[in-house]
Image (cartoon, rainbow, N blue to C red):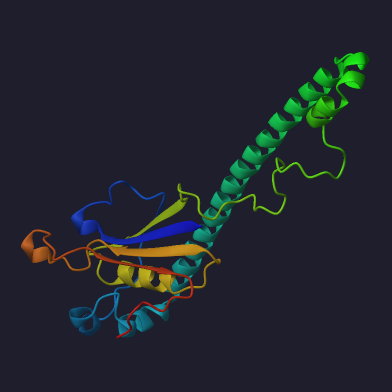
Amino acid sequence: MVRVTIYSSGAHYGPLKPAAPLRYDMRNVTNPPRQLRGNMDGRSKKLRDHLINDKDFLALLETIQNDILREIERLQKLECGKEVQVQVGVGADKEVDTTHEIQQSREIPEQECSKDADSHDKGRLPSDGEDTGDETSTNESQCDPDNENEPTVVVNCFCHLGRHRSASMVEELARLKWPVGTDIEVIHRDIDKDRRSSGKQKKVAKSSRMRGDNGFAED
């Protein structure tokens, strides 16, 4: 499982803190017409449909998507590598213990083995194919999907006020097809702020969905 948290924000209200590893400046993308900006923000499908026809917006959308996919792949490989190392380490410890038991069994005098055959038989090493119940199952996945330390990709798209271009980009990114098991979280930091009221806002707009969930409302 990889979580992708995508922020929209406005440079007018200061940078995102802490800074996201993946940051994209949307201010070079042409702003939508005033009649669209007046009553709509990036959560509006009509506004996004206008921006999706802008070649600069579309090119940046593709760039961000590819960057996120590469980061997801990198984190998945890193997590799988950690799990493989743990599994190999456990197997190595068991092999050392088994070798020690073999050495001990060889030190038992033959006379004791003949006098106490039953006792020795109880302490003998299992033969090939015998089930001891101590072996690690080979059917278990090397990568545990329920890892408590969930790897996260943090992305920040920002424009001037964080209401139109950056918010639209974040919404469009959330609607793309992502690898199975990717948890997409959308946070609009400044979308409800009024620049005339010293940056005060009602609340941070936040939504989250798993791939395949149609939880986003359309206008």
**Residue at 70% in and 48% down:** 137
**Viewer-nearest residue: 157 or 116:** 116
Q: Is residue 27 visible?
A: no
Q: Is residue 163 visible?
A: yes
**Viewer-nearest residue: 67 or 189:** 189
Point out the residue furthest to the left here. 197
On the image, the x and y values in percent for residue 136 come to 69, 44
Q: Is residue 65 above or below residue 112?
A: below
On the image, the x and y values in percent for residue 61 come to 45, 69
**Residue at 87% in and 16% down:** 112
Q: Is residue 10 above or below residue 137?
A: below
**Residue at 66% in and 52% down:** 140
On the image, the x and y values in percent for residue 14 come to 22, 52
**Residue at 25% in and 76% down:** 41
Total marks shown come to 0
Position of 136 compared to 115: left or right? left
**Viewer-nearest residue: 169 or 118:** 118
Q: Quadrant of the C terminus?
A: bottom left
On the image, the x and y values in percent for residue 111 come to 92, 14
Position of 184 compared to 44: left or right? right
Quadrant of the rendered image containing residue 30? bottom left
Quadrant of the rendered image containing residue 188? bottom left
Position of 213 compared to 123: left or right? left
